[in-house]
Image: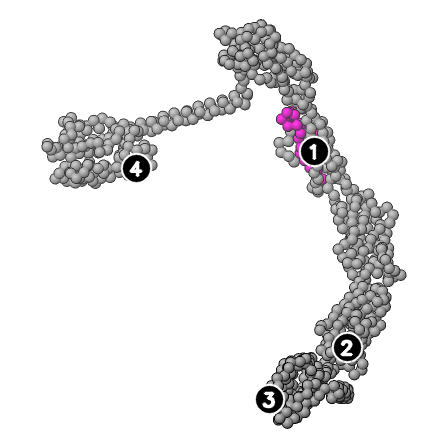
Amino acid sequence: MMACLQLWTMGLLTTMVLSFSLAVGEYSGLRVTEQGPAEIVRKETHPVTRRKREWIWNFLYVEEEKPAPNPYKIGALNSNKKVEVISFKIEGEGANSIFMVDRKGDLFVTRSLDREEKSSYNLKAFMYDGNNKMIEEGGDFVVHVTDINDNSPVFPNTYNGSIMERSTIGTKVAEVRATDADDSTTANGDLRYSLTHDLSAFQINSETGEISCKINSLDRETKSQYVVVVKAQDMRGLAQGSTATTSVTITINDINDNIASFTRKTYELHVPEDHKLNEKIGTLELEDRDQIQNKQPTFDILNDHGKFFNVDLSPNKDGNLMLKQALDYETKSSYTFTVQVKENLHLPADNAATAVKTAQVNIKVLDVDEPPVFSQPIYTFKVSEERIVNNIGTITARDPDQANKNIHYSILDKDCPISIHPFTGQLSTLRILDRELEATHMFQVKAQEEPSGLESFVKVNIVVEDINDNKPELTVDEIFVCENDITNTVIGILSAIDKDDQAASFSFSLASESSNFSIKDYGNGTADMLVKNGPFSLDDPKDYSVHVRISDGGRPLQTSITKLAIKSCRCDARRIPTQCKAGARRMGVSVHALIAILLCILTILVIVILFVMRKRYQKDSLASMKNSGEIHEQLVTYDEEGGGEMDTNGYDVSILTTACNDGSLLRHPHPSLYAMVQKPQHHAQQPTACKGDMAAMIEVKKDEADHDRDGIPYDTLHIYGYEGPESLAGSLSSLESSSTGSNLDYDFLSDWGPRFRTLAELYGVDAPDYYHQY
């Protein structure tokens, strides 16, 4: 029904506009009519003068969405030119497709148009005469597409808003905005807004879409969220207008408008007496309807119990009861007090009448077995040095429990010079203390209950007080006299130091009379060394020295005497030495240095004694081996000939003493050149040594070396019984010996003892069968 009414209304408006356009055209313009050919030719024979355009336009409108099964006329092209035969053409947007013109200038629309797609079309008209000559051009005109209400409002998205509870009336919450594709200058696109339901708390501006608070009693604890529906309607909100809806979620933000309340009126807590300070005893739970970030409770402990306890705010805004002073079951076993909670609110609290603002706290102290308690947190005593003190002071501790157990004392630090009585705690020195070595002694004392074993510890400082127990020491630069020094010449300034902590008043004097020098004491800790009799000579063989006595002025008085050597020098005019005679110097060696020197001498002496004993032991061992009846049981391997004598690898060579069952083993067609020495006759009666396989092998190797004509005879035998500096025979290498043409008699090997008997038998020949003359 509404759509039909809209179409009827638009059709009526269009008809009125077209009728008005045609009337204006007929009144003010000339419609071109058909004329004869002669007139047309006449007009063409005269050129047309260009004049001002004389198009007469009317407003051309096309109703959007109007069906066009057949082209329909929307207007005509008119000009005030008087031409008998004319024709028209158009160009531009939609020309000859959407819009058509006939020869008479009537303009037609060929299809339905959509204003939201394109609201106007720009065209240009041209007029021609009968010979198709343009007589008017550039007639621009616009075809407007008139709007109809064919689009509904649209909300681009959903909306959210928020507002503080208890906000005033008119406080803005959110703003909504819808769009309509229809012409906004007409009623088709003019929107109005309204809320469809839940109108009790919020309102909306019908033109701007702004949502605001309608009441001032919003309560988040009652209702924390609202959802309102907004309707947008075109046609300025008339019933026939199109509509659209959207939802707006409104969140009520919290403020602190509720006072905290105790969940109980009485809290019972049990606390051991050794509970640590500033630690939580228990929690006083609270109830507050506000959100946790808006809770701001504060606590007060009534009466005088605030010096023992206090209440801190916990992370979840409850009350943590804390201990401020140590508890003692033996002194007080229970506490009862009242705690008050409050909040500073800018508005009256919603729960002011029902909140529990005070609560009673009952604390029961539990007895525990506690360790001993010292009378002081730290002990400091003073003791004089250089003396044994039997009573430095007393360490006292007690058992805080009712049992009052006995206490046993002990010192934890090892090598502590202080001792403690295990039952009385009395301190005494174990040895003499020296302040100059260690001025303060610090250690820990343990107090332990018996027999439970609970223990406590305390720090003890022993300050060693100074006494005047160190002699003064002379401090002076090198002192010299010049040859031309006269009487009362200052040759040096004397001063002293003292290791004691007491203020010293040094005085200087000569320990013995001196004919050449004197001391002038100024009484301020310094003195001058003066020449008593001068001048001096470098040729004088005498060395100058004085004995200086120093007193420190303390109690007891400490005095020292120091020998001070004085050099003789030849000086220039400014008393600068140019040549000095070497004189005696004040020498001194400390006890520690003497001990170190003696230890070094003793160490060297011990090393020398051990070395001598080792040499003697080696010689005794060698002698015992020489006297041994069997010396051929070991051969020792050396890496190089004449090498070390410390034998490491031994081999059994008893095969050398193997009995000869067949003498042919030792007989060769060509005897070794190394064995061509004839033995004297006095050895003939001795039995021939029995040679085994090893001996035969040695003979063969010697023979090969003798007959090798291509090179020098290499030493192929590297295994000997004894060889080198430790052997009486020296080296037995064949590199320095030869068996050919040698006139060396090897019988002397028999004189070296049984150890060389085998070699004597190998290198000697005791039978005619083994003797050859070359």
- Rendered image quadrant of residue 147: bottom right
Which residue is more in the foreground, 434 or 402?
Answer: 434
Check residue 190 in the rendering and tell me which mark sits there, or answer none.
Answer: 2
- In the displayed structure, 732 sits above or below 343; it is above
Mark 1: amino acid: Val
Q: What residue sits right under mark 3 in the picture?
A: 131
Tell me the residue at 32%/34% (across/down).
Answer: 647
Three-letter code, disc 3:
Asn
Q: Which residue is nearer to you in this view: 284 or 156?
A: 156
Crowd band around label 3 with a 10 angstrom C-alpha radius: few (<14), some (14–19), many (20+): few
The C terminus, quarter of image: top left
Nearest to the observer: residue 611 or residue 601: 601
- Residue numbers of the magenta segment: 426-449
- Amino acid found under the numbered disc labelled 4: Asp
SS category of the residue bearing label 3: loop
Q: Quadrant of residue 328?
A: top right
Q: Residues within 10 Å of mark 1 (few under 14, many from 20)?
A: some
Tags 1 and 4 touching, CB below 8 Å: no
Label 4 secondary element: loop
> Residue at point 88% right, 60% down?
348
Q: Is residue 651 left or right of residue 172?
A: left
